[in-house]
Image (cartoon, rainbow, N blue to C red):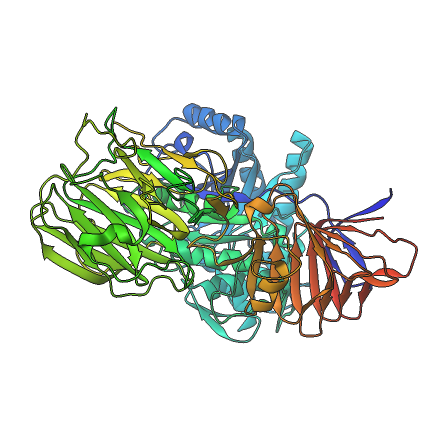
Amino acid sequence: MKFWYINILFFVFTGIRLMGQNPDPALIGYWHNWNDPNAPYIEIDEVDSRYNVINVAFAVPQSGTDYLMEFIPESVSQLEFINQVQLLQGLGKKVVISIGGATAPVSLDNVTERDAFVNSVNSIIATYGFDGIDIDFEGSSLTVSGGTIASPVDVKIIHLIDAIRQIMSDYYSANGKKLFLSMAPETAFVQGGMAAYGSIWGAYLPVIDALRDSLEVLHVQLYNSGSMYGIDGNIYSQGTADFIVSMTEAVIQGFNTSGGMFNGLSPQKVAVALPACPNAAGGGYMDPGELKAALDYLRGLGTQPGTYELEQFGGYPDLRGLMTWSINWDAVSSCGSSYEFANSFENNFGNSGAYSLKFLASGSDSTPDIDRVKIPLDAPARPIDVGGNFTIEFWMKAQPGDNTAQECQPSSWYFGNVVIDRDVFNDGDYGDYGIVICDRRIVVGVQRGNLAHGGVVGNTIVDDGSWHHIAVTRNSVTGGVALYVDGILDAISNSSHSDQDISYRDGRSTGYPDDPTLVFGAEKHDYPGSLYFKGKLDEFRLSNNIRYTTNFTVPAKPMKTDANTVGLYHFDEGSGLVLNDFSGATGGPSHGNILYGGTTVGPQWSYDNPFQNYLEVTTTNNSGTGSLRQVITDASPGSIIVFAPHLNDQTIYLNTPIPINKALIIMDLNANKINIQASGTGPVFNIGSTGRVVLKSFNVISGTGTSGRMLNNQGNVVLRDVELTDINPGSGNCILNTGTVQFQGNTYILD
């Protein structure tokens, strides 16, 4: 067998540009060196381990100069600081000295000042063992009065370019390796060049252009910015997904200015720079959920979050990472949550799973104890066994018609399709409760002993094929229950006789072994005629307080634990027999047992989750519900299609080609990639003139024809990390292209 190994950015059948190995995503943060009364302070060796580039801020001009640089560690001795730098470097971190800052302009007005700048920076690097320099010239440090981007005439710009080149040359001579070079300009100095090229507007562009080959990463400050033009000619405001996407694509694609064309940078050299929390900057902070939407779209992993449309269809999967001002702000919980920004990086660039669990309603009295999660409550007692005030919240998704229970009341909740079951057989002893779907709505029932039930009947239809956040609160003093759907109060009962403690009594004897359990997705006793939940669950949290008393904004990311959390389940295991409790509650953990079974084994893991809008292929059939063909047919333009976890390493055989005439991203998230094979002459996909398609991380196997037996493309297709196997080489062509084909990442063609 022979093959071609293609690792390229762009290919249109008219030329190939090869790339080297892609650098790993970077989390870059600035560490405050001075005792700023408005900012928190942490030791440099206390930096969160996820930061792999630490920019020490700042080296500043000595008093009386604006070119002779100095760096003096605050709060620690020089020797102790050097030891801390070496400690971080021993952990594989880059520690870089940032030069300048907002309050310390640097101006290299002549050759003498340039050389003094070079010598002083070289001395700082050598003294502290820094791995590189970060150029953060602001204010009056750089200005444009004439010339062009390619041929600057301003001495400050020319001397800075020369100085950086000399510093890099000196470092290589002394250390035998390249100096790490990054830049952190404000938007006015870069994207501002589209509006004007003069004064500070566009003043960084000649520096970036001259040093582009040496530059490791550019992270333009997308904060304290105001509004800026995008390359589409529209104006975008900071703090929005559109601003992140448009400003980032501008430095990748390049743009025209009155000083000439700025040719863009590789996405591998571009990071998105944002404040760690609202207090860290005057503007530009992004909520983690909005940030994820913007980054997913930028990286070709998500749908368009705003009005700005990427010029490069499929985005930039090799985007370098994130930068923040600052690590100090990120470390404290007084501004956002502790390490919110580092968590956002991990959530966006990490490899952590993002699953939900799909229940198939397979259980019955004849096939008991399958297709559910069971969490023990007793022997020993678990913290998840709440009985006083509590809040239960979770995400659910169900399709219309899959849960058939008719109307029911809190007193008969167990006749519904059971989502959450904390029942005991016969009267409730201390107490019990359940959450079900009846008549397409949520019903909650609560009972203590043989007293009258408390609870509510919801008003919102929840089996509509969309994710819904469900929250139920219970007041132990009044017995009142409130139901919130998507953060909006849906139903409330202010009191009931079933008040006080409704926990499972510790050490209680019973002839029913499932009594001392909390169950997801099934009626725990498999009582004849019981109805089971068919749908998906994700992000379940149980708290020992009343968490909501008014309408609220539903979480845009996985839930976190706190002092009141007694059970927290992310449903991100993706496999195995254990559902892990991440609450950290005293007396825990309250891990759950996943019980699989049924003709089609349930529950099944799914990539569909509340925070990522995926359409999921669930069968290898050529056609029909859940097939790739049907999912593509039903998908709205711009959708992202993935293959369910249980399709790992399987093959889809296509009797006829699948036509695509819309914008889609089709990708496989599984470890062992799915094969999509043409059963006849081919092709696998017929991409029409209106088709704009990204095919990512799966295997395409051709048919046996002579023309376009793998792909017939008249539109725009991106092949990213795809293995293409031609089973009929030497006969015609495997790809028939009259449109545009781009190869990205590690793409193979085998025959």
Q: Is residue 689 visible?
A: yes
Q: Nearer the viewer, residue 63 or 30?
A: 30
Q: Splitting the image into 4 quarters, where does residue 40 fall?
A: top left
Q: How many marks?
A: 0
Residue at 48%, 25% (x, y): give it. 87
Give the residue furthest to the right.
730
Asked if 419 appears above or below 584 in the picture, the reply is below
Q: Nearer the viewer, residue 559 or 751?
A: 751
Residue at 52%, 70% (x, y): give it. 308
Query: What percent of the width, then of the height, locates residue 628?
Result: 62, 59
Query: What percent of the width, then of the height, locates residue 348?
Result: 49, 49
Q: Is residue 263 left or right of residue 295?
A: right
Q: Is residue 405 left or right of residue 704?
A: left
Q: Splitting the image into 4 quarters, where does residue 298 fall?
A: bottom right
Q: Is residue 123 left or right of residue 407?
A: right
Q: Nearer the viewer, residue 128 or 423?
A: 423
From the image, which quarter does the N terminus lie in? top right
Q: Splitting the image into 4 quarters, where does residue 525 fall?
A: top left
Q: Is residue 65 visible?
A: no
Q: Is residue 339 left or right of residue 425?
A: right
Q: Nearer the viewer, residue 554 or 417?
A: 417
Query: What percent of the width, then of the height, locates residue 597?
Result: 47, 40
Asked if 556 appears above or below 590 in the picture, the reply is below
Query: What percent of the width, then of the height, locates residue 725?
Result: 79, 50
